[in-house]
Amino acid sequence: MLSRIAESLFWVGRYVERADDTARILDAYLHRLLEDPWSDEDAACRSLHAILGAVPARDRSCDIDQVLEHLAFDPGSGGSIDGAIGAARENARRAREVVSTEMWECLNSTWHGLAEQRAAVRRTGPHAYLRLVRSRAALFFGLADSTMNRDDGWRFVVLGRSLERVDMTARLLAVRVLAAVHAPDWPTLLNAGGADESFLRAHRGAGDSASVAGFLLLNRDFPRSVLHALATAEDCLAALAGHGGRGRGPYGRPDATLLPIGRMRTRLEYLDPEVLPGGLPGLLRDLQEACTESAAAVAEQYFPYDGPVAWSQEGV
């Protein structure tokens, strides 16, 4: 597979997952503000910016309209929903010969449909817009699973999705743990992570901070948990690395792309849940660093870029 195609597929997975996670987080926060009119809107909006790595204006209060403009409707930012869907569509166009027609039509129609939904936000609210993004992201990944061969192209899409999912879940938990002033409550955090119903089924009722954090990090059966996403990313990287065995080279050394993900997956596999609350800040930091390190190694190994070719005149 050409490196440019592999890179496009990797970023398609990341951008669609980013749009989906951002829509889930915004929807959960907006429902929280509607249900509790006495909640601090400025604090909630600054918490949203903190989760998604954006910096709100310090000289004025932060409100929902400002959040939507920055985190949903900004087409020039890869961290906003519009920007992520547009970037995913552009990368899918570059890899058009690999993605299925149904996958391309899903992204293309979503990108065109967002403009109409965005225009209706002031009349009907943002929930239809956010619901469209969530449903189309689920449709896109379902089409990827059902219409692509289980080859390297599919693995790059799933790898991008998995790394992005780990990073976004770690961001959600980090705001709750490290930024108590702007922190969401645990039900809002579960809803933002798409885990509220699964958590209630698993725990038969409301849980405390340790059980919620443990579910989002350590549950092996929930597909949006960090451990599940790390295991999926590890499987994709091992298959891409080849060499026989689990991504190991001829001398038994782990592949550079696999090493940070494998370390974190093993660490979570054998983590004692009892010590999770006290070690959560360091663990979340290490998770984000592992994703960054693995993504950089993937780019270096599979997406090499030597710069543009400089043409010279014949005989010079």
Image (spheres, rainbow, N blue to C red):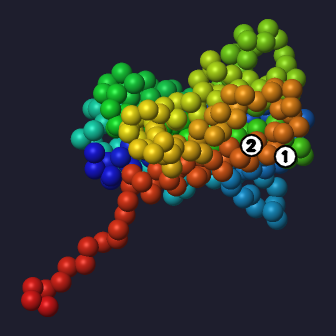
Q: Amino acid at mark 1?
A: Leu
Looking at the image, tell me whether mark 1 or mark 2 is earlier in sequence order.
Answer: 1
Please tell me the numbered disc located at residue 284. Answer: 2
Question: Residue 200: percent from the left, percent from the top?
Answer: 75, 13
Residue at screen point 30% across, 27% down: 149
Q: Is residue 53 left or right of residue 129?
A: right
Residue 196 visible in rendering = yes
* Rendered view: 212 above or below 254: above
**Closest to the observer, 135 or 30:** 135
**Closest to the observer, 157 or 150:** 150
Marks 1 and 2, how far apart at CA = 10 Å
Outermost residue on the front side: it is 251
- The quadrant the N terminus occupies is top left
For label 1, count other residues whose C-alpha is less than 10 Å away and answer few (under 14), some (14-19) or many (20+).
few
Residue at screen point 18% across, 83% down: 312
Which-is-in-front pick, marks 1 and 2? 2
Q: CB under 8 Å between callouts 1 and 2?
A: yes
Residue at screen point 79% across, 34% down: 33
Q: Which residue is the site of mark 1?
A: 178
Q: Amino acid at mark 2?
A: Leu
Residue 113 visible in rendering = no
Q: Quadrant of residue 274?
A: top right
Question: Residue 66: percent from the left, percent from the top?
Answer: 69, 52
